[in-house]
Amino acid sequence: MSIVCEQCSSSRIGWDAWVDQDGNVIGGPYDNCLCMDCGSSSILRKEMFDIRFHLGAGKHYKHWQIKDGKNVTYLEPTKYSLIMNDCVLKNNRNKAEKVFQSKRRDVCGFVRCLEYKVVDRCHTDAMFLEPEVKYEIMFDPKIAPYWRKHNDPDAYDNLTYCKLITNGRRIFVA
Ligand SMILES: [Zn+2]
C-alpha cells in the first residue's frame, strides 16, 4: 500500500499510531494522517499491485500474475491485455544476477502499479493499442539481469511510467 496526499500528491505523510505501553503499533496505524508538505489531512491510501509473467509449472504457466498482497489473480495473455498505471519496474538485482550466471530461472522482476485495467482482447481489435505505444520494455534475467528497453543496453530498473500496456507476453510503454 502507498499513502499519498489527495491535495498535492506528496508521499511525505506524517501519521500518529495507536501504540501500547511498550510502543508497539496496535490497531489502525494510519490514524490521524497529515501531509508534511501542504498540511492537508485528506490522505489517499492506495493499494499496490505486483504484476509479472508467471513461469511456474501448473495451470497458470505463462499467464500474467497479479498480486495485491493477499490476493493472486492470473490472466491468459492471448485473451487479455493489461493497462497498468503509475508503474515502477522492480527487480531483485541479486537474484537476477544469479539467474544470469546460472541460467536457472527464479522470480526476480515485476511491475508494481497503483492501478490496472483488464482489456478483453476477444472483444476488441488486438491491434487497437498500437498507436499509443512508444517502445517495448523487457525483462529476461537469462539474457540481462535487469529491466531493459528494446535495442538499449542500459538498465531500466526502478524507472517509473505513467502507463504500461501488455500485448500478449510483451510489455509496452504508452
Ligand atoms: Zn499535501
Image: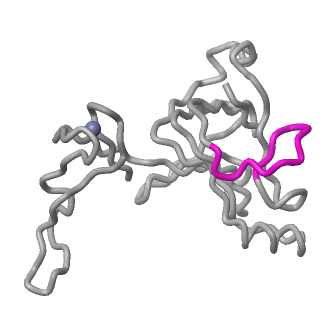
Q: Nearer the viewer, residue 150 or 108?
A: 150
Q: Is residue 5 magenta?
A: no
- Residue depicted at 78% across the width and 28% down the height: 135
- Residue depicted at 56% across the width and 31% down the height: 162
Q: Is residue 37 left or right of residue 77?
A: left
Compared to residue 24, the image places residue 9 above or below, namely above
Where is residue 150 shown, x and y percent of the image? 86, 38
Q: Is residue 55 left or right of residue 9?
A: right
Magenta residues span 147-159
Q: Nearer the viewer, residue 102 or 42?
A: 42
- Residue depicted at 86% across the width and 57% down the height: 144
Where is residue 110 shown, x and y percent of the image? 64, 53
Q: Is residue 21 left or right of residue 174?
A: left
Q: Is any part of residue 80 visible from this angle?
A: no
Q: Is residue 149 magenta?
A: yes
Q: How is the image coloured?
A: one colour
Total tally of numbered discs in the picture: 0
Where is residue 138 shown, x and y percent of the image? 79, 44
Q: Is residue 111 left or right of residue 134?
A: left
Where is residue 114 shown, x and y percent of the image? 46, 41
- Residue depicted at 55% across the width and 48% down the height: 112
Q: Is any part of residue 169 visible from this angle?
A: yes
Q: Residue furthest front?
A: 37
Q: Residue furthest left?
A: 21
